[in-house]
Amino acid sequence: MKYILRNVLIFSLIVVIAAGLTGCGNKVGDIELKEGTNAIYIDEDGAVVYGVGESFKSGDYDEEALEKYINEEVEDYNASDAASVDNAIQVDRFDVEDKVAYLVLKMATVYDFNEYIKDYNKEETNFFAGKIRDRGDVKIKGDFISPDKKKKLTDSDIKEMGNSEILILNGQYSVQIDSDIKYISDNCKVDKDGMIITAKAEDGLSYIVY
């Protein structure tokens, strides 16, 4: 979802969330948000934080117009029937520091995260966040391992876990989830801090089951 901040800078969709739920400064959960970072944090109650830091040259973009665009898009979602609660999405931060733009959104639920991406970026057909049984046409394929690498499953096994939550991403992200991670696709890795690093887009879709 690198499109989220970068594409808004070219007049498409931006979605960025920072540490408004569990932290301060340039952090998404415990993930440091900096230039080139795409980060997702899902807390134990299912609220989502998604963050991006992107290069921003003031001569190329109108910061005030961009902020207005973001606010209008969020207001549009919140006024729709899709929103799970009042103010389901909030713009927590949008600013530019040292030529890096940060946009911060807080989403009340994983459902709102999924609906917002689905409704406002029609090109992102491979993204999904929610229960495995609700994924629709989004495919699950490949091999899976437990974070400790002691257990292995096939995609057929994962499809049988209908009540489990899954995050499906196309691109490289740092992900923190405050729930027990059951399995990750074998193109993901776990860093020294326990964060999941998903694969680059050219290496296929990444899956996190929790």
Image (spheres, grey):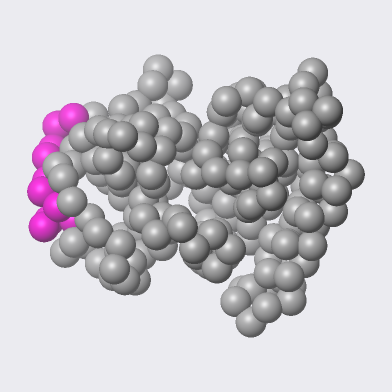
Q: Is residue 152 magenta?
A: yes
Residue located at (58% from left, 63% from top) = 120
Rendered position, 107 above or below 174 = below
Residue located at (50% from left, 44% from top) = 1
Q: Position of residue 45 (x, y in %)?
A: 55, 56
- Most extreme residue toward the front, as rendered? 60
Please indicate, yes or no, whether residue 154 appears anywhere in the rendered image.
yes
Residue span colored magenta: 149-158
Please indicate, yes or no, whether residue 146 appears anywhere in the rendered image.
no
Between 127 and 113, the one nearer to me in the picture? 127
Q: Does the magenta stretch include residue 53?
A: no
Q: Where is residue 68 in the image (x, y as percent from the top left)?
A: 84, 54
Task: State which quadrant residue 140 falls in.
Answer: bottom left
State left or right for residue 143 relative to residue 205: left
Task: State which quadrant residue 191 falls in.
Answer: top left
Between 161 and 156, the one nearer to me in the picture? 156
Q: Where is residue 110 in the image (x, y as percent from the top left)?
A: 51, 60
Task: State which quadrant residue 4 falls in.
Answer: top right
Q: Where is residue 93 in the image (x, y as percent from the top left)?
A: 79, 42
Between 188 and 11, the one nearer to me in the picture? 11
Rendered position, 104 above or below 159 = above
State left or right for residue 174 relative to residue 59: left
Residue located at (52% from left, 39% from top) = 2
